[in-house]
Image (cartoon, rainbow, N blue to C red):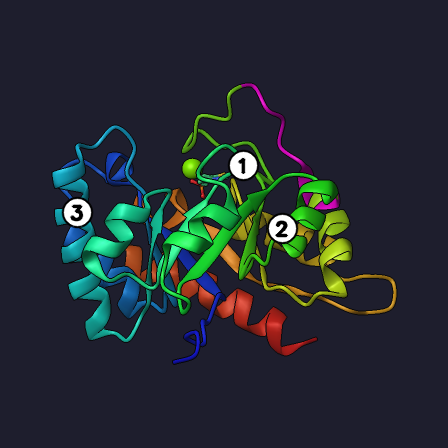
Amino acid sequence: MSKPDIDYSLYLVTGRELLPPGKDYYESLEESLKGGVTLVQVREKDTDTGEFIEVAQKTKEVCDKYGVPVLINDRIDVCLAVGAAGIHIGQTDTPLLIARSLLPPTAIIGLSVTTPDQARLAIEHGADYVGIGPVWYTTSKDLKGKLSIGPEGAGAILEVLAESRIPAVAIGGIHPPNLPFLFHASIAPDSRNYLAGIAVISDIVSSLTPETASRGLKQVIDSFLRSR
Ligand code: TZP
Ligand code: MG
């Protein structure tokens, strides 16, 4: 069996703590899928393992209806428990090569990178995709004092990834008004662009109308991806 073909264009990272008061997580998720989300990562911080598995399982059931793959943040055990498509890990999580040895060969493994050197290592260790960020400041993740890298920082990492053609998604503080800056920085002087998509939490999850928010982002990213 080969790895699934993933559409990274509009990548939703979940954040139940950011839902508007009274908004149900699964309803919000389904609305965002209707709006065009192409990939979902279940991200739970400080959630008991049993509850994490339950949320991941139910999330997968909703996403399956839309043919959208699910990745799990950090947790190999949760990924295996629910049969998710793979995991997303950060620089201080289970090292990529160890994660690879524990997961089925078809599993997708994404890695967060903040610097060109980390991107080089991601290539060397065989990441299936990388998440570049935080591009802009965000309160959706504890940045632990780290600075955001800006669109220029993202552009420098995309340059490193260009040869390997590993899909890259930008993350962190992404909202429609700042997308043009990201897109501008994502095009190398020789017109190459290897940005595969955008990953967002709050722009979609904090919205009272996640379908509309997703549709808006999807239109903008699609027209950028078509233009290359
Ligand atoms: N990794 C880098 S920034 C970030 C993660 C998970 C949070 C992105 O959330 P938002 O609300 O889209 O800024
Ligand atoms: Mg992590």
Badge 3 local density, few (<14 within 10 Å), some, or many (20+)? many
> Residues under labels 2 and 3: Cα distance?
27 Å
Residue placed most toward the observer, 23 or 115: 115
The label shown at residue 55 is: none
Residue placed most toward the observer, 141 or 111: 111
Question: Which image quarter holds the C terminus?
Answer: bottom right
> Residues under labels 3 and 1: Cα distance?
23 Å
Of the residues shown, which amino acid type is indicated by label 3?
Answer: Ile
Percent coordinates x, y for residue 51 in the rendering: 13, 40
User: Which residue has dot 3 on it?
Assistant: 53
Residue placed most toward the observer, 85 or 218: 85
User: Which residue has dot 1 on it?
Assistant: 91
Label located before the other in sequence (3 or 1)? 3
Badge 1 local density, few (<14 within 10 Å), some, or many (20+)? few
The magenta segment: 145-152
Q: Residue furthest right?
A: 189
Of the residues shown, which amino acid type is indicated by label 2?
Answer: Ala
Residue 1 lies left or right of residue 120; in this view the side is left
Q: Residue at x 49, y 39 (%)?
A: 90
